[in-house]
């Protein structure tokens, strides 16, 4: 088994250690990022949906930055939404603030019934820029 090259964003290592998972793993030129939610500093969910989505993207961007990437390096996105029938349009009003220009990454959107008190989660796979550790 290969060694896991873990990427930790600044000031959040305790959160991941407490919950026993890695925020991101570098492997074979790719960065695999765990699902990110719109948590406040204390780990609680942001109550406003659109603010929660923005926080999820900010948490994601902190991990991408720690790995030497940006959202432009993202090739695949999976989002999870509680009750997408009533939340999708409000969520997708925020997404263009972070998504960038076309061509856009691939996307899978999944409706779920529970996200540990959150309404939105995003996980991605990014291509590591040339010259960065694999």
Image (cartoon, helix red, strand yellow):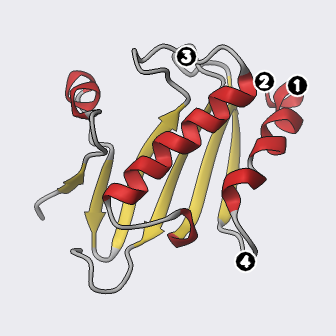
Q: Which mark is residue 83?
A: 2
Q: Is residue 87 left or right of residue 25?
A: right
Q: Which residue is mark 4?
A: 103
On screen, residue 57 above or below 68: above
Q: Are marks 2 and 1 in contact (CB under 8 Å)?
A: yes
Residue 51 occupies quadrant = top right
Q: Is residue 27 left or right of residue 97?
A: left
Number of callouts: 4
Query: How far across and down, in percent of the image, does residue 111 sit?
Result: 72, 33
Q: Are marks 3 and 1 in contact (CB under 8 Å)?
A: no
SS state under label 3: loop
Q: Which residue is mark 3?
A: 45
- Mark 2–mark 1 Cα distance, whole angstroms, equals 6 Å
SS state under label 4: loop
From the image, state whether disc 3 or disc 1 is nearer to you. Answer: 3
- Mark 3–mark 1 Cα distance, whole angstroms, equals 19 Å
From the image, state whether disc 2 or disc 3 is nearer to you. Answer: 3
Residue 107 occupies quadrant = bottom right
Name which of mark 4 and mark 3 comes first in the sequence: 3
Q: Which residue is mark 1?
A: 86
Query: How far across and down, in percent of the image, does residue 97 sit?
Result: 73, 52
SS state under label 2: loop
């Amino acid at each position: 088994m290969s060694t896991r090259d873990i990427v930790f964003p600044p000031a959040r290592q305790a959160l991941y250690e407490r919950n026993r998972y890695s925020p991101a793993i570098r492997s074979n030129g790719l960065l695999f990022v765990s699902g990110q939610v719109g948590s406040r500093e204390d780990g609680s969910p942001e109550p406003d949906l659109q603010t929660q989505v923005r926080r999820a993207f900010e948490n994601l961007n902190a991990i991408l930055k720690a790995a030497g990437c940006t959202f432009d390096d993202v090739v695949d996105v999976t989002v999870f939404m509680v009750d997408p029938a009533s939340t999708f349009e409000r969520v997708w009003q925020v997404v263009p603030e972070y998504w960038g220009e076309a061509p856009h990454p691939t996307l899978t959107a999944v409706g779920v019934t529970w996200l540990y008190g959150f309404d939105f989660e995003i996980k991605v796979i990014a291509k590591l820029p040339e010259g960065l550790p694999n």
